Amino acid sequence: MEKDRDRDRDRDQVEEIRKRVDAVELISRYVTLRQSGDNYKGVCPFHEDNDPSLTVDPQKKLWHCFGCGAGGDIFKFLMRMENLSFRETLEELARETGVELNGSEGGGERTSLARLNKEVRSHFHRHLTRESVGKKARDYLQARGYGLEMAKRFKLGYALPGWRSLTNRFRGEYGLDLLEEGGLTKRSDEGRPYDRFRDRLIFPITSSSGQVIAFGGRRLEEEAGPKYLNSPNTPLFTKGHALYGLDVARHAITDKERAILVEGYTDVLAPQSVGIENVLASMGTSLTEEQAELLRRYAEEIVIAYDRDGAGERATLKSMRLLRNKGLAVKVAQLPQKKDPADVIEEGGKDEFLRLIEEAVPFHDFYLQVLEDSYDLSSVEGRERALRDSESFLEEIESPPLRHELIRRLKDLLDLPERELEDIFQRGKGGRYGRKKRSTDADGSIAEDGENEGLNLNEWLIRLALEDKITAQKLKEEGLLRELDPQNRFLVEKVSAAREEGRDLGEIMDELDEEEENLLARISLADVPFKEEEIDQASTDVIKRIKNKKSRQRLRALKRELKEKIAQGASNEELEEIQREILEEKRGLEEVNK
């Protein structure tokens, strides 16, 4: 695995980076953390989390979410948040901490693509700013009200009209294969390479950390192909996974706790050009689950400012549901018909656009207005169609209070009793919003079945092995090691061996796969119901409880067998043998509980 190779090659540097990185500071860039005892807690960025389920241990430099089960070390957190490979994460943190990596000038395909994209962005930008070459693109920007300041802030560029300008410039250093892999070069039917972007204003697309991952291009001649042309999916870029302008807007969004979501590139440039900085674009008319998740990391409220045409309205409805189901407050700015944010600012200025944002209507008000505009509610047929529409719309709303509010408002709109609407919408939805309770002991700590913020018995063995209080050898001698499921047995043996060799938790994590890493992080960060001086007694208690559980299971099995043998008319000798085993098991249970 790439991760393992990179860790092995840079093991000393990995440990040095781990020592230098402040886990709380790193994770606080994405999540608001508050101290809770020796640890810190916050809302998990990896699932819809209304409670602070994420725990960060600043000493162990581990994190774990007790809601969704994600967890790991500082490298794992940054990899997930920024969608980076381990090598890219290592390089990012090495730059921050001043640690020099082995072979830092090399890198895999993603690293080479990132370097190529960065150079291509500079290549395009130089063409835009050159007096004669980029005049056509600069004139377009000027006509829309954007000067060179905006071009520099967003690193806008210009692709020359020639068929192989970019290909010839970079093929010698990077090779045609990488240019094609990055979506910069295409091939003709005859196999000849040519530039994907020609005679276009270029919008570099970046990740939230500012890495160039793709490009968008707007035509400058009316008959020159599609109006907008974007990079295809590449190892760095997946359509629907990025938001245009996020790297520029994210600090303003975090400060205001609000993001203004628009459709396209120039819809971002227009507000930014007049000082409205918390604006970003979905790069199309259909927000995706991944983009909604990105927004949830930075904002509390989203104001959608899509075009007021048919496509924009459908996209708004879909986006509202996705964002609302992520726990975000959602409003809709009602732009004039056939106008986009750039048009509003060009014609009415900053104040007019801000007025529309401040007067944005809540989620449910907008939906009800769409129903009124779409159907003739004065007729039975119109109300029937509106009811079918609202059934499918509400089916995807996960918030019970929001569903109830929509139903309450629909009863007047559709002239139907509220109870009847509730029955229609809840039919077949029983239990949809309920959450299964996880089992726990009466003291809320060590549960024999299920999982909670405490640990089940098998997991306690792993935790105690981490604390050097139980070894795999001791469990083997007690006859308990073989009772564990394969994953827990593997972890006990792995942790026990590592601790005997003097290796710390971070080094153990390096040798695990993702599932094992998540489990070990959760076990390591779980609250314990006893003090440090009580840990020896806890070790004894856990072993006793496991033996108790094992004996009770054996007793139940023997009693079932005895009952079945009696029903089958088994011989006295067979029945007596089972009874002797039951007696021995009871004596053993009494011995354990002395």
Image (cartoon, helix red, strand yellow):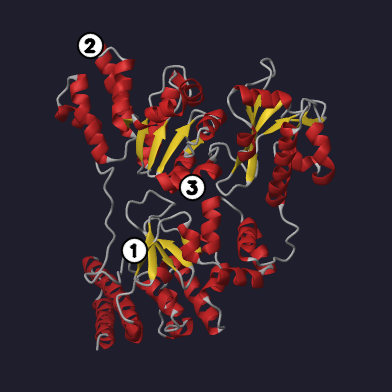
Q: Residue at x 26, y 37 (%)?
A: 402
Q: Which residue is mark 2?
A: 378
Q: Is residue 405 above or below residue 19?
A: above
| Badge 1 or badge 2: first in the primary sequence | 2
At label 3, counting other C-alpha atoms closer than 10 Å, the crowd grade (few under 14, some 14-19, many 20 or more) is some
The image shows residue 182, relative to residue 517, as above or below, that is above
- Residue sitting at x 41%, y 19%: 336
Residue 259 percent across, percent down from the top left: 43, 39
Asked if the residue under mark 2 is in contact with the one under mark 3, i.e. CB atoms within 8 Å, the reply is no
For the C terminus, which image quadrant? bottom left
**Relative side of 442 to 39, left or right:** left
* Mark 1 neighbour class, 10 Å CA radius: few under 14, some 14 to 19, many 20 or more: some
**Residue drawn at the location 53% of the way across and 60% of the way down:** 76
**Amino acid type, label 1:** Glu
Tell whether 340 sits left or right of 366: right
Please state if 102 lies on the left or on the right of 585 as rendered.
right
Number of marks: 3
To which quarter of the image does residue 400 belong?
top left
Mark nearer the N terminus (3 vs 2):
3
> What residue is drawn where x is 71% and y is 31%?
158
- Between the residue at mark 3 and the residue at mark 2, the CA separation in whole angstroms equals 48 Å
User: Which residue is label 1 attached to?
Assistant: 451
Q: Point out residue 304 in the picture as x, y percentages from the top left corner.
A: 41, 32
Q: Residue 99 appears at what percent x and percent y?
A: 66, 67
- Residue type beneath disc 2: Ser
Among the 4 quarters of the image, the one containing residue 548? bottom left
Dot 1 lies on which element? loop
Disc sitting over residue 251 in the figure: 3
State the SS at label 2. loop
Camera-nearest residue between 319 and 338: 338
